[in-house]
Structure formats: structure tokens, C-alpha cells
Image (spheres, rainbow, N blue to C red):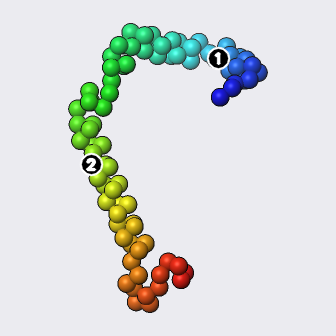
């Protein structure tokens, strides 16, 4: 994505117009990232206790919903035997 020079200058102007509190908060975030860069870069799914299990459960639930939806769409056993194509 190409960002125009005008857009970049507008972004800089916005930052320069920020009050000191906002700039201090941004600096605190930058300082935190710099101090914890190694830990942040090492983070992954396997580093977060229980996350993989939760993701697996979520995927199983998604698969179940998809299967149920597909079965429902293909089910023509209704009182009027109406198929999707007939609607």
C-alpha cells in the first residue's frame, strides 16, 4: 500500500498537535515494547497456557456448526418436501 506524502504529513501534524499527556503515553508504550521486545517476539500459541486447547475446541465447534448447517441445507424432509431449488 502506497501512502501519499500528504497523508504522512497529516499524520505527523496530528502527532505534533497532541498534548503532552498523549505523547507521554505513547512514549511509555514504546519504552515498554523496547524493554520487553525479546519476550514479545517469543510469544506464540504454545507459550500461552491453555490457548491451543481452547483454539482446538473452538475449531471443533465451528466444524460442528458448519456440518449442521450443511445438513440442514440439504434436508428436504419437511412437511411440504420443498427443496432449496424450489424456493
Q: Local crowd at mark 1 within 10 Å, few (<14), some, or many (≥20)?
A: few
| Residue 53 screen position, x and y as percent | 23, 41
When asked about the image quadrant of residue 46, the answer is top left
Q: Nearer the viewer, mark 1 or mark 2?
A: 2
Q: Is residue 71 above or below residue 51?
A: below
Q: Are marks 1 and 2 in contact (CB under 8 Å)?
A: no
Secondary element under disc 2, as helix, strand or loop, is helix
Tell me: residue 79, above or below residue 26.
below
- The residue at the point 47 percent across, 85 percent down is 82
Q: What residue is drawn where x is 75% and y is 19%?
A: 5
The residue pinned by badge 2 equals 57
CA gap between label 1 and label 2 equals 43 Å
Q: Which of the numbered marks, if any, corresponds to residue 15?
A: 1
Q: Which comes before the other along the chain, label 1 or label 2?
A: 1
Q: Secondary structure at mark 1?
A: helix
Q: Is the residue 44 above or below the residue 69 in the image? A: above
Residue 10 visible from this viewpoint? no
Say few, some or many: other residues with alpha carbon within 10 Å of mark 2 (under 14 / 14 to 19 / 20 or more).
few
Q: Quadrant of residue 55?
A: top left
Task: Tell me the number on the disc at residue 61.
Answer: none
Q: Position of residue 84 (x, y in %)?
A: 50, 77
Left or right, residue 78 beside residue 48: right
Residue furthest to the right? 6
Residue drawn at 39 percent across, 77 percent down: 75
Residue at image coords 51%, 16%: 25
Q: Can residue 65 be seen in this snapshot?
A: yes
Q: How many labels were placed on the picture?
A: 2
Residue 87 lies, in percent from the top left, at: 54, 81
Quadrant containing the N terminus is top right
Amino acid at each position: 500500500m502506497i501512502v501519499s506524502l500528504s497523508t504522512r504529513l497529516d499524520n505527523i501534524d496530528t502527532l505534533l498537535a497532541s498534548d503532552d499527556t498523549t505523547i507521554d503515553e505513547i512514549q511509555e508504550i514504546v519504552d515498554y515494547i523496547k524493554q520487553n521486545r525479546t519476550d514479545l517476539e517469543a510469544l506464540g500459541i504454545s507459550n500461552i497456557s491453555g490457548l491451543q486447547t481452547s483454539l482446538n475446541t473452538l475449531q471443533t465447534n465451528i466444524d460442528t456448526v458448519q456440518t449442521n448447517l450443511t445438513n440442514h441445507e440439504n434436508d428436504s424432509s419437511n412437511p411440504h418436501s420443498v427443496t432449496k431449488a424450489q424456493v
